Structures are given as structure tokens and as C-alpha cells.
Amino acid sequence: MRVLVFEPMVPIALWLSLAVAAAGLLAWYAVDCARRLGPFSAGRIAVLMGIALALPLTILLNPTWHDRVPPPAGKPLLTVLLDSSASMATCDSSDPNATDAKSTGAGSIESGSRFDEARRIADSLTARLGDRYDVQLQTFAAHSTPVEPAELGALKPEGQFTDLAAGIASLLQADRPQGQAIVLLSDGIHNVGGEALVLEVAEQARALTAPIFAKTLGGDTHVRDLSVDVQTPQDLAFVNQMIPIRVQLESQALAGAVVRVALSSEEREIAHQDVTLSADQTTSLEFPVSHDRSGVFRYEVSVAPIQGEVTDANNNCTYVLRVIDEPIRVLLLEGKPYWDTKFLLRTLASDPSMEVVSIVRLAEGRYLRRKLDRPADPNPPVGAGPDEVAPPADGQPGASDQHPEHDGANLVSRGQAWQILPGVADLFSDADWLNSFQIIALGRDAESYLTDDVLAQLKRWLATGGGSLVCFRGTPTVQVSQRLGPLLPVRTSAVRETRFHVKLTEAGKALGWIPVPRSPDEPDSLSTLPSLATRSGATDTRPLAVVFAVGESTSGNPSPVVTSMPYGTGRVVVLEGAGMWRWAFMPPQFDKQEQLYSGLWQSLTRWLVSNTGLLPTQTWALRSDKVRFATTEPATASLLVRQSAAGGGPPTIELTGEALAEARSLVPVAVGDELDAYRVVFGRLPVGRYQAAVTGSSADDSSARTIFEVRPNVDEVLHVVANPGLMGQLSKKSGGAVLESGSPTEVATKMEEHLARIGPEQFRQTTAWDRWWVLLGVFALWGLAWGLRRNSGLV
């Protein structure tokens, strides 16, 4: 359709003034010509002059042709995205039409499930909107998959994960001129990554003008379930050391039931406890175990299923205990005597699994070196006192010299040696001496230790030796050098001294280093401890850093207090704040809080040694990255090999398991440029228990073997409360809308509103006067009028 539209080049008032003036002049001229030439000749001249004046005035009105542009060929795309994860099998559909009868056998869907309702809506949209839009069906759980309408009836919601972000992102098309939109049929349960990823994808959909019309299926539904888990699935112990297996029992809608929690080893029950379940809370219990030989030992904690449970796949869990017969060697360095160092040394020495060497700078050129050997009996009888060894005199072992870091009040019976050193350069120049430690604890004012040569040695020790550096009073130097900075997980700047209380983050609570409140009404034990002081503020954390605890003060935002970062095969941990020694010196009425101090350090040291590092006598260390893997993720392990044994290449790893017909041999792959750090990828494995071992290693070599298991993911059937809030945010941020019923009429209305916003009627504009023949005609008329006037005798 073509329409002529006038778009004046000058204001209409000015144009009218020109038109009136031109008409007046033309009338006067016509009257004057009629008096001199007669009416006939004057009329011809007036007509030609009128046309000659009208043409420029018409051009000033800018006449323009508007031609309607036809829309792009093809239909707009409407993608119907169905959630096929296991939570969609929940039977809480509010749709009266979702009455398809299904068998109730294992793995089937009952009548009225969420997936039934989604399938009915999808069938209706496909049948009634296919003539207006290009309707495509997709299902998703961990990723999206196209499906034909005829195949919908045979589909079952069995996905073990729900990844809304991945499901939507795969559907967005950058070049769809006809228009596109997505109808999302889901319960809104997203359990892969955070919800921020979903909202980022919604922003991408908005940028591509692909709104999401979301229909939330399901409601606030809870299931009956009982699950058992251990706080630390992998632990480290020493021969004859008693270790508690901390068990957490969680229940949903099973208050008042009495269950039996059993601990088994080698298919034999060795202990059990009866527990009365509380209402939707976690019950904690412990099973103490010990071993008189080294090795890797597998335990299973189980609880009998209760009638009505949604699944029994989480009624048992595995605990792996690695028992070794050699100590954890810790090197403690401090720039000057301080109470924090005194109480840390006392705490480490009270642990029979530790062998501690401490070096304290007393003055310029005077260092006190103290060595606490591992006790001969790691579990001394109650009441056994410490070996009282007199500290040395100046430079002479065995003589008397009192120093504030000497304290044997709580030490287990162990041999001690003292020595005054003029310097420490010779010690750190010996790479073998440094490699004999698994943990180096570094205090403040450590400039005399951290020379360029020592820092180079520390970096090699961390990167290739798998050691752990712990800065237990914040940044170890006043000024952080360019060599030291990359080692630390936080960047800091000097501030006025502030005091703060420590609060665990979610990552810190998951480690289970100290007890956490079971309910909001229960006080946080950390909040009752004395505050800590700091003169450095964290500006930011490095990309791989994980914050386990933050400091809360009255003068600012929470700042990192306990931060960890991997470095090569090792790890660096920074504990910010001075005054933690007060946690170990509480009044008698706070004796439980005093135990938190020792528990924190014992848990930290075992976590560090369990996850990284080679013990001095170990040739290799094979550890699975987790004790429990899901069937949808690859099982992996890490292998450290001592440099002296890595010259011939990595050893092969043999994998055995109850679900494997025969053992598998795998070759580890080097991690980056490190010749002694390897990664072992076993791939996705079926459900079952597995053991991996270095080929050719002895059966009692605990460092050469690891144990893990593979289980299906049960989160999808446990956490089935629909999330309409996330679905609403997803719709809003994408430019879409929330669907009330999901009917074809409602979807078609939303779709047409969307198409009207992005695709209004478009017209192609063409000026009607901008032609060569128009201008030629104007000049021709002007010339004809002038010629007629001249021919009539007018000037």
C-alpha cells in the first residue's frame, strides 16, 4: 500500500505566509495584466504564473511516498521448553486435565504429575499454534534436546540435574528476523551453579529479543526422607590414634521415628546407635575408631529405610580413613616472641601426630630453635606428664635460658631439643631440610626469614613439593614484596587497628572444622570468643581464593579472615588477626570455647595434609578428588610423585570395582609444567564402589591407593519445592511474562504483544519531488510563462 504524506521543510506558519503572499501578488498581477492585455491573454499568463509559484510551494511541503515494507518471510519461532528432570515427576499438579493414567512401577509417573501438566500444555500449544508460528519442542535437564510431538507420550522425567541456564542458552538465536520467544514449563528448581547464571542468561535473551514466558508447575511440596552423611568423608589418622567419625542424620517429615544408625567395616557391623528423629532437623553423632597398622580403611554408615521414604539411595554413606605411621612435620617461624606463637606451639605439641620445629627471632643474629619430636607413645595414659627438658643457655644446648615460648604444661610426653642459632640462611639453603616439612606456619615480622633466596625455595616447595604455607597472624611482613605478593590469597593495605569477631562462611561451615549452630536460635560459638585485632584490610581476593571465615566489626563490611588458595601442588592459608591466643586461655566457665582453638588447628592441619603434600617417606600420594561421585560426572584423582621417582614417567593406576567386569589400567596426565603432579581421569562410572592403586605397590602402602564410590544424584527427588520466584525473575529480566494457565490463547496474546513491540509496521519513504523530470518541469513552466509574457509585450 502506497500513501502520499506531506512533511514540510519549513514551519507551516511560514509556509502559509508565503502562500498568502504569493496568492496576493498573483491576483494583483492578473488584474494589472487584464487591464493592459485583455482578459484572455491575462488569464493564460496568470494560470502559468500560478502554476510556477505553486510548484516551489509544493516542494516546500516535502511530499513523500510511504510504501509499506512486507515482513520477513517465514513464521516467528516459538520454542516450548519442557523440564524433564526427576523433580517433575512429583504428583502435585493443580491441573484438572492432567489425568493420563500411568503405571506406578519403578521409575514411572503417576497421574497428575508436573510433567503430565507440562506435556498437556505442550501438546495444546503445538496443535493450535502451529499454523501461526514455527512451534518447536525441546526437553531439558542438564542440557536441552529436541523432541517431536509424537514422542512426548513416551518421555519420562528422569534427569538427575536441572540446569535452567544451559537449557535456555542453547535455544537463543542471534539471527531470527521473524521474531522468537520461549515458553518455559518447569518447577523452577535450578541446582547446577547459582541462580545468578540463570539471570545472566535471561539478560542475554532480552538482548536478542527472545522473551521467556514462564509457567511454574508444582507447589510447596515436601517429601518423607531420611539421609545419613559424614562431616569429613576423607580423614587422616596415625597408628593407634582414636578418630571420631562425625555422622549427620537429616530427616524430613519423620519426627518421632526411632532409627538405628550402624557403622560397618568390611561388610561387618562394628557399632550402632539408636536415634529419635526430630522435626526436619539434623542429628549429630560420633563413632570413635582407631587402627594399629597403616593403610586405607573404608567404613560405611547406614540407616534402615523407613516406609514412605521417597528414596533410600541416601540411607548410607562411605567414610575413608587413611592411617599412616609417621608424623606431620610442622615448621613454625616467628619474627619475635609473642603470645600467639606460644599458644600455637603448645597446641601443636599437644597433638601426638605432630613433630614440630619452631624458630623464633629473639634479637639481631640470635634465633631460638626448638624441636619437639614425636612421642614414643602417641596415646599416653591419662595423667602422663611431659618430658621436662631445660632450655639451653646462649648457644649451648642443655643449659638454662628462659624464653616466653617455652611452655610444657599441656605437652604430651616427647623429646625436646633447644639451640641458639646466629642465623637461618644455612637451614633454608638445604632443600632436603625444607622438603621434610608438610606445613610451614609463618608469623609476623618475618622479613629476616623471607629473603629472595628463601622465597624462591618456598615457591618451589609449594609448587612441586605439595607443602602448605600458613600465615597465622595475617600478612607476614609489613611491606608485601613483589615476590611474596603472588603467594598470598588476599591483597591487603594498611589501616587503623580494628577489632572484629569471626564468622564462618558457607564454605567454612562445610569443612566442619568447628561445630556450627543447628538452628537460628542457637548461639554461634565463635561470637562468644574474644575479638581479634588487625591493622591490615583486605582489598580483594585472588581468583582461586576461597574464603572460609570473615571478620565482622562495627566499622565496615565483613573482610576475609581465613582464606585459602592453591599454589601449584600446594596450598597457602592466611589467618588474619592477632590475639587468637586468648581463645586458648579462657576462664573456667568457658572451657568448651577453649577447645575450639585446639580443634580448629587440628582440623586445619589434617585438612592440609589430607589434601596436599607428600610425607617424607612417601614415594607417591594417590587421592581421589572426592569420596562420592555422581553418575553424571567423571571420577577423578590426583597423584603426586616424588621427583626422584618421576624420572621414568608416571606409574600406571589400576582401577577395580564391583561394577567393573575386569580391572582397568590408566596412565596419569601431567598437570601443567609440573613433572611430579598428575591427574587421573577414570571417566563416568556406573553405580558402585571402587578402589584405585598404583600398579605394583604393596597392599599396606596407604599412600598408593584410594577408595571412592559412585552414586546417582538424589537431590532432584528430595528438594521438590517449586520456585515461582526464580521463574518470575527469569520472565521479567528477559522481557517476557509469567503465564497463568499456559493456554494457547494466553500464549498467542503474549506472543502478538511481543511481535508488535519488536516489529511494528515499517514503511519505505521516497520523496515525490526529488526527480529530474520534476525540476525540469518547473524550469519549463517558468520559461513558458516568461516567453508568453515577452510575446505579449510584458517585461
Image (spheres, helix red, strand yellow):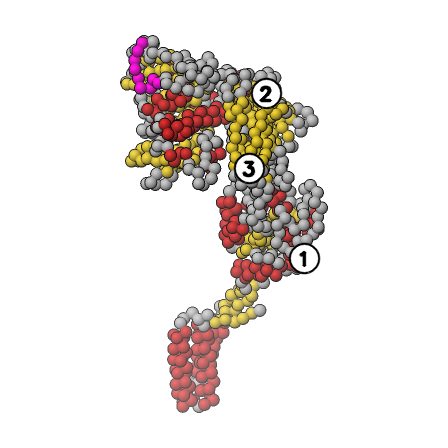
Q: Amino acid at mark 1?
A: Ala
C-alpha separation, residue under disc 3 versus residue under disc 2: 43 Å
Residue found 67% across the figure and 50% down from its top: 111
Residue 639, quarter of picture: top right
Q: Which residue is mark 1?
A: 127
2 and 1 marks in contact (CB < 8 Å): no
Q: Which residue is mark 2?
A: 694
3 and 1 marks in contact (CB < 8 Å): no
Residue 635 image offset from top left, x and y in percent: 59, 31
Using the image, tell me which numbered label, if any, was put on residue 81: none
Identify the element where label 2 is drawn. strand
Quadrant of the image containing the N terminus: bottom right
Identify the element where label 3 is drawn. loop
Q: Which residues are magenta?
A: 399-407
Residue found 63% across the figure and 36% down from its top: 305
Q: Amino acid at mark 3?
A: Leu
Question: What is the total number of numbered labels drawn onto the structure image?
Answer: 3
